[in-house]
Amino acid sequence: MTNIAEIKAFSKPLIANLHKLGISNVQALLLHLPLRYLDETHITAVRDLRTGESAQVEGEIVHAEVTYKPRKALIARLEDASGQLTLRFLHFYPSQIAALKVGTKLRVYGEVRSGFFGYEMVHPTCKPVGASTTVAETLTPVYPTVAGLTQASLRKAIRLVLLPNALTETLPASVYHPLPSFAASLQALHNPSPDADLHALENKTTAHWRRLAFDELLAQQLSMRKHYARRRSVNAPQFTRSKRLVSALLKSLPFALTSAQQKVAIEIERDLTQPHPMQRLLQGDVGSGKTIVACMAALQSIENGWQVALMAPTEILAEQHYRKMLGWLTPLNIQIAWLTGSQSKKDRATALEFITNGQAQLVVGTHALFQEAVQFKNLGLAIIDEQHRFGVQQRLALRQKGQPEPHQLMMTATPIPRTLSMSYYADLDVSVIDELPPGRTPIVTKLVSDTRRDEILQRVREACVQGNQAYWVCPLIEESEALQLQTANDTYALMQTEFPELQVGLVHGRMKPADKQAVMAAFSSGDLQLLVATTVIEVGVDVPNASLMVIEHAERMGLSQLHQLRGRVGRGAAKSTCILLYQNKLSETARARLKVIYESNDGFVIAQADLHLRGPGEFLGVRQSGVPMLKIADLERDIDLLEAAKTMADKLLTEYPVEVEKHLDRWMGSAGELVKV
Ligand code: ADP
Ligand code: MG
């Protein structure tokens, strides 16, 4: 692939700017596609303008002034043979005032609006008209760019490399049929003909866009398949089924597994008997009972003589798992080590020694588990709870702690919508717990305006006086951690004054781990009745007696986050309520979001809506670091292409191995190698 630095016609600053856009080779430059298009192919008479449409108008400036009311603005009037158009600039430079002198001939382009004095354009682009000014022959593409790189130079650079020998097909025609060729598609998108359908172009629904979306989706499928195949080709410790420990554990439990838990436990057990590393995602709504399933897998590994690592994203959750494992496994004589970043040096050294010499059969901890100093004797299985909180690289690091490669079990309460499991998650096997343990009463969700705070405080008092427990979740303040902390402290002080008769606790991310644990333990044991918390309690916390949750400024939180938080209640037999307090004057999207959470208790529905409202980039969160995101294809709009790409990926891999490499090379470049999920 030609590096752009080798192109003689490209200046050093141009190359530097292209690098800023992430473009280093010709293929990437060719695939840098327009965001939108301008129709500068004809000039519209003022009389023929239509509100809401973009148009190009040519005329003479007949009036120009800077006004100060209602706010500072530069206003000019442009006249052609058919009428006058107002041009309005709210931010402007002295040079622009000069360029709009009365008598100047101008060509302007912008969106037409109806103003007080007839048609107007706000911040149109303006070009002086000379004797030789011609009209564009094709629609003008507008590209994503960076400061210092003009549209004109970007267009010129792309035109220079848009040559037949760079536009060769990577795919056999039978694979992309009936979509147009790659060359025709790129030509049409970089230089669309004047009669192209501007709407379809901007919505990326033309055949040419669809061809590129298909190619992109196909590349993603191919790279996922390759990773899957790689995994099948490497060795992992092969376990036999557990004969002793798992049944001993199940006998000791006060409950029986649900049939959904049994089903996924069998899927995992079978994977562990394979000689290849398992990479399975265990998905189950909050409270569905994933931990016990993970524990069964751990016992299978331990019984086979291999160590297990159980990693959680927060210290609170890791601690909770540790306690639970102690409770379940100590009677079975299993040795458990505990590892976090906040341990004393001495405790840490002891734990590390215990892990290295193999005495620790199970290690529970936080991110600390994949640090360099942690050496396992023989890691056979890595279990990662709340997997979406970890980046690809972090999980990779844990995988590298075993030789041969350990099995991996990832757990998540956020369901993966179908479009994502077909695309970004296509390399993983998925098990779903689609049933909650019996005896849970559904959580009642209420949307309440912040103006009714007093009533809510009263409810909290009543719940606690009756012997239940409550969470009060402080607003999320993403902009400033200091402010977030202050809010938490203020709320805590407020609650203490409000409820002198109750024991109130506070937990937030900035507390010392030991203090955090003490507070959680006090809440767990019922010594505290009301827990003021930040979103640190979002994942995993399990206190069955808590039956009321109040979430302040619920409109600021993501849907999956709200669902997770809400899942902290409704864990016991008591009827539970979650109150979402919102600030009045909700925006349209905030209203739509809260409506979803109000109407549904189904994590799957919520995840689907979350994906729809936020897009895959936000939804995938940390997982996206290291995973190339789709730039052209849209999983919702292009679902048919995704299906086609899935089918065609199989065909290509069996029949056209050379084309597979060519295609991956074009679309993934070296990034393709990064997706070792
Ligand atoms: P999550 O899937 O959210 O991680 P947990 O594993 O924390 O859920 O389980 C939630 C609670 O349900 C725990 O207290 C756990 O002991 C309990 N539990 C798990 N499985 C069952 C079951 N089959 N019947 C009754 N309770 C169960
Ligand atoms: Mg859990």
Image (tube, rainbow, N blue to C red):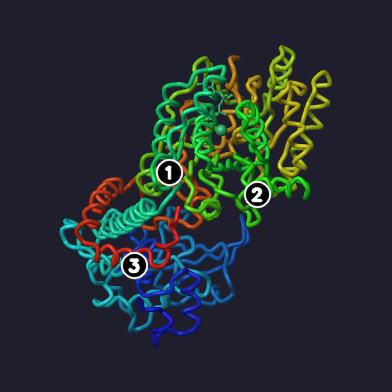
Q: Say whether residue 465 is left or right of residue 104.
A: right
The number of numbered discs placed on residues in the rendered structure image is: 3
Specify whether 676 is left or right of 139. Answer: right
Q: Nearer the viewer, residue 170 or 397?
A: 397
Q: Where is residue 88 in the image (x, y as percent from the top left)?
A: 51, 62
Type of amino acid under label 1: Gln
Please tell me in which quadrant of the rendered image residue 253 appears: top right
Indicate which disc, 3 or 2, sits on the residue closer to the N terminus: 2
Numbered badge on residue 489: none
The numbered mark at residue 368 is 2
Circle 2 packing at 10 Å, graded few (<14), some (14-19), many (20+), is some
Looking at the image, is mark 2 or mark 1 earlier in the sequence? 1
N-terminal label among 1 and 3: 1
On residue 665, which mark appears?
3
Please, what secondary structure does the residue beneath circle 1 have? loop
Mark seen at residue 238: 1
Residue at disc 3, secondary structure: helix
Is the C-beta separation of discs 1 and 3 under 8 Å?
A: no
Q: Helix or strand or loop: what does disc 2 sit on? A: helix
Gap between marks 3 and 2 measured at Cα: 36 Å
Q: How far, Cα to Cα, is label 1 from label 3? A: 35 Å
The x, y position of residue 588, in whole percent, is 50, 38
The three-letter amino acid code for the residue at tag 3 is Asp
Foreground residue among 228 and 529: 228
Alpha carbon separation for disc pair 2 and 1: 27 Å
Q: Which residue is drawn at 43% across and 53% down?
A: 114
Which residue occupies 41% across, 57% down? 119
Q: In which quarter of the image is the N terminus?
A: bottom left
Mark 1 or mark 3, whichever is nearer to me: 1
Q: Does the residue labelled 3 lie within 8 Å of ligand 2?
A: no
